[in-house]
Image: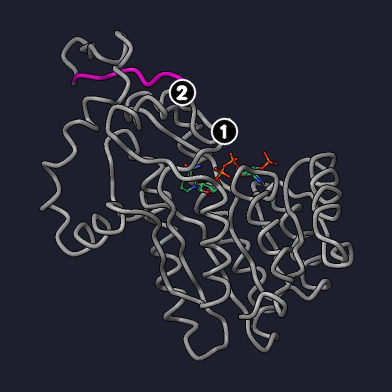
Amino acid sequence: MKPTAARIVLTGANGGIGRHAAAAFIGAGAAVMLVGRSAAQLSALSRSLQAKVAGSAARIAWQVADLGKGADVAELVAVAAEWRCNVIVHAAGVPCFGALETVAAETMRQVLDINLLAPMRLTQALLPHLRSQERAQVICLGSALGRIGLPGYSIYSASKFGLRGFAEALRRELSGSGIRVQYVGPRSTRTSFNDAAVEAYNVATGTSMDSPDRVAATLLRSLHDEAAERFIGFPERLAVRINGAVPTLLDGSFEKHRRSVPPLPASAASPTRRPGGPAISHPTESPGAPR
Ligand SMILES: NC(=O)c1ccc[n+]([C@@H]2O[C@H](COP(=O)([O-])OP(=O)(O)OC[C@H]3O[C@@H](n4cnc5c(N)ncnc54)[C@H](OP(=O)(O)O)[C@@H]3O)[C@@H](O)[C@H]2O)c1
C-alpha cells in the first residue's frame, strides 16, 4: 500500500534495524506505533523521530510489550486495534549462533518463542481487526537463513524457516481477503544482534554485511509493492533460489562455514559414556545466547 495510507505496528522498534525502519516509514508518510520492552527507549526514539521529520508527531505512537508475555500481547492488540493499525511488521527477534551442542535448552526455547511463536500469536490475535480494514499487510522480517541452513545456525534457521513457512501458508490462506502476508529476508546486517563470534565467522567466510538502512529501505519497498518475498544481496539471492529448488546441491558448499563455527568446549566435544549406556554430551550455556 502507499506509505501514506499505512498505520504500522512495528515490533523490535528499538533494535538496530527497527530504528531505521521506523525512520524510513515515518519519512515516507506512514504512521508508526513503535513497540519494544523499554518505555524510556521508546519515548526517546519517538522524540528523536519527531525531531527528524517535521509534522510527524501525530503519526508516532509507542507501546511497551514483551512479546513473550501473553498479557502484554493482549494489551498491544487492543491498543493497536483502537489505533486502527493496518500493517504489522514483525521485526523483533533474538540471535542464536554456535554449534548445536553449545545451545542451552532455555536459549532454544526463547529463540523459537520470540522469532516464531510471537509473530504467529500476534498475527492471529490481530487478524479479526485486520480483516475489518480495507487493505492490510503482515510483513515478517525473516532472514536469508530462513531459506538457507548454514553451519552454526541450526536453531536460528529453524525459527526463520518456520516464520517463512508461516508467512507462505498464511498468504495463501488469506488470498482474496485484502490481507497480504510477506516475508523479507535480509542477510547479515551490521547491528548489535551480531556478536564478535558472528563477525569473525562472516570475515572468515567472506559473508557481506549490510547496513540497517539497506534493510529499512527494503522493508519500505515491500510495504509499497507488497512483494510476497524479498531477499537482499548477491550471492544470497541466487543461493536462496538454488537452495529452494535443490537444497542438496549446495550441501558441499559450506565447508568454510563449518570450519568457522567456534570450536566446542572440551566438555561438550568429548562425549562421556554412562556405564553400559549410550554416549551423551553436555550442553553448556551458548556463547551466542540471546542478549
Ligand atoms: N542483524 C542481522 O544480521 C539480521 C539479519 C537478518 C535478519 N535479522 C532479523 O531482523 C530482526 C531485527 O534484528 P536487529 O538486527 O535489529 O536486532 P536487534 O538490534 O538485536 O533488535 C532486536 C529487537 O528485538 C526486540 N526483542 C527481543 N526480544 C523481545 C521480546 N521478548 N519482546 C519484545 N521485543 C523483543 C528487542 O527489543 P528491546 O529493544 O526491547 O530489547 C530489539 O529491539 C530480527 O528478527 C532478526 O532476526 C537480523
Magenta stretch in the rendered image:
279-287
Residue drawn at 27 percent across, 58 percent down: 240
**Does residue 247 appear left or right of residue 198 in this picture?**
left
SS class of the residue under badge 1?
A: loop
Give whichever of 25, 198 is nearer the camera.
Answer: 25
Asked which quadrant contains residue 255, the reply is top left
Chief SS of the magenta region: loop
- In the rendered image, which residue does mark 2 sit on? 196
Please give the label number shown on residue 192.
1
Q: CA distance from mark 2 to mark 1?
A: 9 Å
Give whichever of 141, 239 is nearer the camera.
Answer: 239
Q: Residues within 10 Å of mark 2 (few under 14, many from 20)?
A: few
Asked which quadrant contains residue 283, the reply is top left
Where does residue 25 sit, x and y in percent of width and height? 68, 64
Ligand 1 found in image quarter: top right
**Does residue 52 appear left or right of residue 86 in this picture?**
right
The amino acid type found where label 1 is placed reads Ser
Residue drawn at 41 percent across, 61 percent down: 164
Where does residue 149 sit, x and y in percent of width and height? 28, 46
**Does residue 131 appear left or right of residue 205 in this picture?**
right
Within 8 Å: ligand 1 and the Cβ of disc 1?
yes
Asked which quadrant contains residue 291, the reply is top right
Q: Is residue 132 magenta?
A: no
